Amino acid sequence: MRYPYIRMRRLRQNSVLRSMVRETRLTVDSFVLPYFVRHGNGIREPIASMPDYFRLSIDELLKDCGEAMDLGIKSVLLFGIPERKDHHGTAACEDDGIVQTTIKALKDKYPHLLVITDVCNCEYTDHGHCGPVIDGDVHNDTTVEILARQALSHAKAGCDMVAPSDMMDGRVQQIREILDDNGFSNLPILSYAAKYASSFYSPFRDAAGTTPSFGDRKSYQMDMGNSAEALREAALDIDEGADILMVKPALAYLDIVRRIKERFEVPVAAYNVSGEYSMVKAAAAKGWLDEECSMMEILTSIRRAGADIIISYWAQKAARIING
Ligand code: PBG
Protein backbone atom coordinates (compact mmCIF):
# COMPACT_ATOMS: atom_id res chain seq x y z
CA MET A 1 0.00 0.00 0.00
CA ARG A 2 1.24 3.44 -0.87
CA TYR A 3 0.10 6.78 -2.17
CA PRO A 4 -2.70 7.62 -2.92
CA TYR A 5 -4.13 5.09 -0.38
CA ILE A 6 -1.61 6.08 2.27
CA ARG A 7 -1.49 9.77 3.02
CA MET A 8 0.71 10.63 5.98
CA ARG A 9 -0.78 14.10 6.13
CA ARG A 10 -4.19 12.73 7.25
CA LEU A 11 -3.04 12.60 10.87
CA ARG A 12 -1.46 16.05 10.75
CA GLN A 13 -4.62 17.91 9.78
CA ASN A 14 -5.38 19.57 13.09
CA SER A 15 -3.95 19.96 16.55
CA VAL A 16 -6.29 17.41 18.15
CA LEU A 17 -5.11 14.69 15.79
CA ARG A 18 -1.51 15.76 16.09
CA SER A 19 -1.58 15.67 19.85
CA MET A 20 -3.46 12.33 19.84
CA VAL A 21 -0.67 10.63 17.90
CA ARG A 22 2.30 12.44 19.43
CA GLU A 23 4.83 9.80 20.47
CA THR A 24 6.95 11.86 22.84
CA ARG A 25 5.65 14.00 25.65
CA LEU A 26 7.48 16.10 28.17
CA THR A 27 6.47 15.67 31.77
CA VAL A 28 7.36 17.96 34.65
CA ASP A 29 8.28 14.86 36.69
CA SER A 30 11.33 14.25 34.57
CA PHE A 31 12.84 17.71 35.10
CA VAL A 32 15.67 18.54 37.45
CA LEU A 33 16.21 22.22 38.18
CA PRO A 34 19.83 23.37 38.69
CA TYR A 35 20.68 26.09 41.23
CA PHE A 36 23.80 28.18 41.82
CA VAL A 37 23.91 28.94 45.51
CA ARG A 38 26.15 31.52 47.20
CA HIS A 39 26.73 33.06 50.59
CA GLY A 40 24.83 36.12 51.78
CA ASN A 41 21.26 37.19 52.30
CA GLY A 42 18.62 38.52 49.96
CA ILE A 43 20.90 38.00 46.97
CA ARG A 44 19.58 37.38 43.50
CA GLU A 45 22.62 38.10 41.38
CA PRO A 46 22.12 38.03 37.59
CA ILE A 47 24.50 35.89 35.53
CA ALA A 48 25.63 37.91 32.51
CA SER A 49 25.99 34.96 30.15
CA MET A 50 22.76 33.24 31.31
CA PRO A 51 19.90 35.73 30.93
CA ASP A 52 17.08 35.29 33.49
CA TYR A 53 19.27 33.01 35.62
CA PHE A 54 20.70 33.98 38.99
CA ARG A 55 23.17 33.14 41.71
CA LEU A 56 20.98 32.92 44.79
CA SER A 57 21.61 33.18 48.50
CA ILE A 58 19.95 30.43 50.52
CA ASP A 59 16.91 32.51 51.56
CA GLU A 60 16.24 33.45 47.93
CA LEU A 61 16.78 29.88 46.82
CA LEU A 62 14.15 28.69 49.29
CA LYS A 63 11.65 31.16 47.86
CA ASP A 64 12.45 30.25 44.27
CA CYS A 65 12.28 26.59 45.06
CA GLY A 66 8.83 27.02 46.56
CA GLU A 67 7.66 28.50 43.25
CA ALA A 68 9.26 25.65 41.32
CA MET A 69 7.51 23.10 43.53
CA ASP A 70 4.19 24.83 42.93
CA LEU A 71 4.79 24.13 39.24
CA GLY A 72 5.28 20.43 39.99
CA ILE A 73 9.08 20.35 39.97
CA LYS A 74 10.23 17.73 42.45
CA SER A 75 13.97 17.75 42.13
CA VAL A 76 16.88 20.21 42.20
CA LEU A 77 20.62 19.98 41.49
CA LEU A 78 22.90 22.14 43.63
CA PHE A 79 26.12 23.89 42.64
CA GLY A 80 27.91 25.81 45.37
CA ILE A 81 29.88 29.01 45.03
CA PRO A 82 32.20 29.15 48.05
CA GLU A 83 33.61 32.27 49.69
CA ARG A 84 37.19 31.12 49.30
CA LYS A 85 39.05 28.76 47.02
CA ASP A 86 42.40 26.98 47.45
CA HIS A 87 44.63 24.52 45.60
CA HIS A 88 42.91 21.39 46.90
CA GLY A 89 39.38 22.75 47.05
CA THR A 90 39.04 21.97 50.76
CA ALA A 91 35.92 24.12 51.24
CA ALA A 92 34.02 21.49 49.24
CA CYS A 93 34.08 18.97 52.09
CA GLU A 94 33.29 21.22 55.06
CA ASP A 95 30.19 20.35 57.06
CA ASP A 96 29.15 24.00 57.12
CA GLY A 97 30.07 24.58 53.46
CA ILE A 98 27.69 26.37 51.15
CA VAL A 99 26.17 23.22 49.63
CA GLN A 100 25.94 21.38 52.94
CA THR A 101 24.15 24.36 54.55
CA THR A 102 21.79 24.66 51.59
CA ILE A 103 20.90 20.97 51.74
CA LYS A 104 19.93 21.31 55.40
CA ALA A 105 17.84 24.42 54.75
CA LEU A 106 16.06 22.81 51.79
CA LYS A 107 15.31 19.51 53.52
CA ASP A 108 14.15 21.39 56.59
CA LYS A 109 11.63 23.43 54.64
CA TYR A 110 10.74 20.93 51.89
CA PRO A 111 11.28 17.38 53.20
CA HIS A 112 9.80 15.84 50.05
CA LEU A 113 11.97 17.75 47.61
CA LEU A 114 14.60 15.50 46.00
CA VAL A 115 17.93 17.24 46.53
CA ILE A 116 20.74 16.15 44.22
CA THR A 117 24.23 17.57 44.65
CA ASP A 118 26.90 18.02 42.03
CA VAL A 119 30.06 16.44 43.40
CA CYS A 120 33.09 18.18 41.93
CA ASN A 121 35.96 20.35 43.06
CA CYS A 122 36.18 22.88 40.25
CA GLU A 123 34.04 25.45 42.09
CA TYR A 124 36.41 25.20 45.07
CA THR A 125 39.91 25.13 43.57
CA ASP A 126 41.76 28.38 42.90
CA HIS A 127 42.92 27.06 39.50
CA GLY A 128 39.42 25.94 38.43
CA HIS A 129 40.36 22.32 37.68
CA CYS A 130 38.34 19.45 39.12
CA GLY A 131 41.03 18.34 41.59
CA PRO A 132 44.59 19.00 42.77
CA VAL A 133 47.06 19.58 39.94
CA ILE A 134 50.30 17.63 40.22
CA ASP A 135 52.97 17.91 37.51
CA GLY A 136 50.65 19.99 35.38
CA ASP A 137 47.71 17.58 35.36
CA VAL A 138 44.77 16.81 37.63
CA HIS A 139 45.83 13.96 39.87
CA ASN A 140 43.25 11.21 39.50
CA ASP A 141 43.46 9.24 42.73
CA THR A 142 43.91 12.22 45.07
CA THR A 143 40.91 13.87 43.41
CA VAL A 144 38.82 10.74 43.87
CA GLU A 145 39.59 10.71 47.62
CA ILE A 146 38.47 14.32 47.96
CA LEU A 147 35.35 13.64 45.91
CA ALA A 148 34.43 10.71 48.11
CA ARG A 149 34.76 12.88 51.22
CA GLN A 150 32.70 15.59 49.55
CA ALA A 151 29.96 13.10 48.65
CA LEU A 152 29.91 11.83 52.23
CA SER A 153 29.57 15.37 53.61
CA HIS A 154 26.60 15.96 51.29
CA ALA A 155 25.05 12.70 52.44
CA LYS A 156 25.53 13.65 56.10
CA ALA A 157 23.89 17.01 55.43
CA GLY A 158 20.86 15.10 54.13
CA CYS A 159 20.97 15.12 50.33
CA ASP A 160 18.96 12.51 48.43
CA MET A 161 21.39 11.72 45.61
CA VAL A 162 24.97 12.58 44.67
CA ALA A 163 26.09 13.36 41.14
CA PRO A 164 29.85 13.19 40.54
CA SER A 165 30.71 15.35 37.51
CA ASP A 166 34.50 15.25 37.44
CA MET A 167 35.23 12.33 35.07
CA MET A 168 38.03 10.88 37.21
CA ASP A 169 38.52 7.13 36.88
CA GLY A 170 37.19 5.01 39.72
CA ARG A 171 35.24 7.71 41.50
CA VAL A 172 31.87 5.99 41.43
CA GLN A 173 33.33 2.95 43.19
CA GLN A 174 35.05 5.02 45.88
CA ILE A 175 31.96 7.11 46.47
CA ARG A 176 29.81 3.96 46.70
CA GLU A 177 32.24 2.47 49.22
CA ILE A 178 32.47 5.51 51.48
CA LEU A 179 28.67 5.93 51.42
CA ASP A 180 28.08 2.27 52.24
CA ASP A 181 30.70 2.29 55.00
CA ASN A 182 28.94 5.21 56.66
CA GLY A 183 25.38 3.97 56.61
CA PHE A 184 24.25 5.53 53.34
CA SER A 185 23.85 2.37 51.31
CA ASN A 186 20.44 3.60 50.11
CA LEU A 187 21.73 6.87 48.67
CA PRO A 188 21.72 6.66 44.85
CA ILE A 189 24.58 7.83 42.64
CA LEU A 190 23.79 9.68 39.44
CA SER A 191 27.05 9.55 37.57
CA TYR A 192 28.05 11.97 34.85
CA ALA A 193 29.15 8.90 32.88
CA ALA A 194 29.66 10.38 29.43
CA LYS A 195 30.74 13.96 29.96
CA TYR A 196 32.40 15.57 26.99
CA ALA A 197 35.04 18.32 26.95
CA SER A 198 32.58 20.83 25.53
CA SER A 199 32.55 24.48 24.58
CA PHE A 200 28.90 24.56 25.65
CA TYR A 201 29.88 24.86 29.34
CA SER A 202 31.23 28.42 29.01
CA PRO A 203 28.23 30.25 30.52
CA PHE A 204 28.22 27.82 33.48
CA ARG A 205 31.90 28.52 34.12
CA ASP A 206 31.10 32.20 34.17
CA ALA A 207 28.18 31.54 36.54
CA ALA A 208 30.13 29.31 38.92
CA GLY A 209 33.57 30.92 38.50
CA THR A 210 35.15 27.66 37.35
CA THR A 211 37.03 28.58 34.18
CA PRO A 212 40.41 26.80 34.44
CA SER A 213 43.20 29.35 34.96
CA PHE A 214 45.40 27.30 32.63
CA GLY A 215 44.89 24.50 30.13
CA ASP A 216 41.57 22.79 29.55
CA ARG A 217 39.68 19.70 30.72
CA LYS A 218 40.55 17.47 27.79
CA SER A 219 42.71 15.09 29.84
CA TYR A 220 39.68 14.03 31.85
CA GLN A 221 36.49 14.91 29.94
CA MET A 222 35.72 12.98 26.76
CA ASP A 223 36.70 13.77 23.20
CA MET A 224 33.78 14.95 21.08
CA GLY A 225 34.46 12.46 18.29
CA ASN A 226 33.94 9.33 20.40
CA SER A 227 30.88 7.24 21.08
CA ALA A 228 32.15 3.68 21.67
CA GLU A 229 34.17 5.22 24.51
CA ALA A 230 30.94 6.57 26.02
CA LEU A 231 29.60 3.01 26.17
CA ARG A 232 32.77 1.88 27.97
CA GLU A 233 32.44 4.75 30.44
CA ALA A 234 28.78 3.80 30.98
CA ALA A 235 29.56 0.11 31.50
CA LEU A 236 32.33 0.93 33.99
CA ASP A 237 30.13 3.28 35.98
CA ILE A 238 27.33 0.72 36.20
CA ASP A 239 29.87 -1.84 37.32
CA GLU A 240 31.19 0.54 39.98
CA GLY A 241 27.69 1.09 41.34
CA ALA A 242 26.08 4.00 39.46
CA ASP A 243 22.28 3.96 39.65
CA ILE A 244 21.59 6.51 36.92
CA LEU A 245 23.86 7.51 34.04
CA MET A 246 24.12 10.99 32.63
CA VAL A 247 25.11 12.20 29.19
CA LYS A 248 26.36 15.76 28.99
CA PRO A 249 25.91 18.00 27.03
CA ALA A 250 22.58 16.84 25.64
CA LEU A 251 21.92 18.55 22.34
CA ALA A 252 25.17 17.86 20.49
CA TYR A 253 25.23 14.31 21.93
CA LEU A 254 21.71 12.98 21.38
CA ASP A 255 23.17 9.95 19.58
CA ILE A 256 25.02 9.09 22.80
CA VAL A 257 21.82 9.38 24.83
CA ARG A 258 20.18 6.97 22.39
CA ARG A 259 23.06 4.49 22.35
CA ILE A 260 23.31 4.35 26.13
CA LYS A 261 19.52 4.06 26.50
CA GLU A 262 19.43 1.14 24.05
CA ARG A 263 22.45 -0.67 25.43
CA PHE A 264 21.83 -0.48 29.19
CA GLU A 265 18.85 -0.98 31.45
CA VAL A 266 19.58 1.88 33.83
CA PRO A 267 17.71 5.22 33.78
CA VAL A 268 19.40 7.83 31.60
CA ALA A 269 19.68 11.52 32.41
CA ALA A 270 20.72 14.22 29.96
CA TYR A 271 22.06 17.66 30.89
CA ASN A 272 20.67 20.46 28.74
CA VAL A 273 23.74 22.57 29.54
CA SER A 274 24.29 26.29 29.93
CA GLY A 275 25.48 26.90 26.36
CA GLU A 276 22.37 25.24 24.94
CA TYR A 277 20.26 27.59 27.06
CA SER A 278 22.26 30.75 26.42
CA MET A 279 22.54 30.39 22.66
CA VAL A 280 18.75 30.30 22.36
CA LYS A 281 18.42 33.20 24.80
CA ALA A 282 20.89 35.26 22.77
CA ALA A 283 19.20 34.52 19.47
CA ALA A 284 15.77 35.22 20.99
CA ALA A 285 17.01 38.57 22.31
CA LYS A 286 17.90 39.49 18.75
CA GLY A 287 14.52 38.35 17.49
CA TRP A 288 16.07 35.51 15.50
CA LEU A 289 14.46 32.61 17.37
CA ASP A 290 11.31 32.18 19.41
CA GLU A 291 12.60 31.13 22.84
CA GLU A 292 9.57 29.11 23.95
CA CYS A 293 9.19 27.17 20.71
CA SER A 294 12.93 26.47 20.44
CA MET A 295 13.05 25.42 24.09
CA MET A 296 10.17 22.95 23.73
CA GLU A 297 11.71 21.55 20.55
CA ILE A 298 15.11 21.06 22.21
CA LEU A 299 13.64 19.50 25.36
CA THR A 300 11.41 17.19 23.30
CA SER A 301 14.40 16.09 21.22
CA ILE A 302 16.28 15.14 24.38
CA ARG A 303 13.33 13.09 25.58
CA ARG A 304 12.82 11.51 22.15
CA ALA A 305 16.48 10.50 22.09
CA GLY A 306 15.79 8.44 25.22
CA ALA A 307 16.45 10.58 28.28
CA ASP A 308 14.30 9.66 31.28
CA ILE A 309 15.53 12.66 33.24
CA ILE A 310 16.30 16.12 31.86
CA ILE A 311 18.38 18.63 33.78
CA SER A 312 17.56 22.07 32.45
CA TYR A 313 17.75 25.76 33.32
CA TRP A 314 14.41 25.95 31.51
CA ALA A 315 12.69 23.55 33.91
CA GLN A 316 10.42 26.23 35.40
CA LYS A 317 9.59 27.88 32.09
CA ALA A 318 8.86 24.55 30.42
CA ALA A 319 6.77 23.39 33.39
CA ARG A 320 4.56 26.47 33.01
CA ILE A 321 3.90 25.56 29.37
CA ILE A 322 3.34 21.87 30.08
CA ASN A 323 0.90 22.69 32.89
CA GLY A 324 -0.99 24.92 30.45
C1 PBG B 1 31.51 20.78 37.10
C2 PBG B 1 30.41 20.97 36.15
C3 PBG B 1 30.36 21.70 34.95
C4 PBG B 1 29.04 21.66 34.51
C5 PBG B 1 28.34 20.91 35.42
N1 PBG B 1 29.20 20.45 36.41
C6 PBG B 1 31.39 22.49 34.26
C7 PBG B 1 32.57 21.87 33.64
O1 PBG B 1 32.74 20.66 33.61
O2 PBG B 1 33.39 22.68 33.19
C8 PBG B 1 28.50 22.35 33.29
C9 PBG B 1 27.03 22.60 33.28
C10 PBG B 1 26.55 23.54 32.25
O3 PBG B 1 27.28 24.01 31.35
O4 PBG B 1 25.36 23.88 32.32
N2 PBG B 1 32.58 20.02 36.70
Image (cartoon, grey):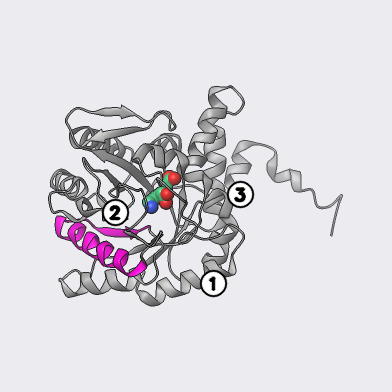
Q: Earlier in the sequence, mark 3 or mark 1?
A: 3
Helix, strand or loop for disc 1: helix
Q: Residue furthest front?
A: 135
Q: Between residue 295 and residue 57, name the one nearer to us.
A: 57
Q: Which mark is residue 89?
A: none
How many numbered discs?
3
Mark 2 within 8 Å of ligand 1, using the beta carbon: no
Residue to which mark 1 is pinned: 263
At label 3, the amino acid type is Val
Viewer-side label of 2, 3: 2
Q: Position of residue 21 (x, y in %)?
A: 61, 49
Q: Residue at x 32, y 73 (%)?
A: 173
| Majority SS type along the magenta span | helix
Say whether residue 282 is left or right of residue 102: right
Residue drawn at (43%, 48%) of the image: 214
| Residue for point 23% across, 28% down | 43
Q: Could you say whether the residue bearing mark 2 is in a helix, strand or loop?
A: strand
Q: Amino acid at mark 2?
A: Ile
Going from N to C along the chain, the mark reached first, 2 or 1, is 2
Which residue does the numbered mark 2 point to in the structure image?
A: 116
Which percent across, then down, holds residue 128? 36, 48
The magenta region covers: 140-165
Asked whether residue 166 is in view, the answer is yes
To which residue does mark 3 refer?
A: 21
**Badge 2 local density, few (<14 within 10 Å), some, or many (20+)?**
many
Where's residue 35, x and y in %? 31, 41
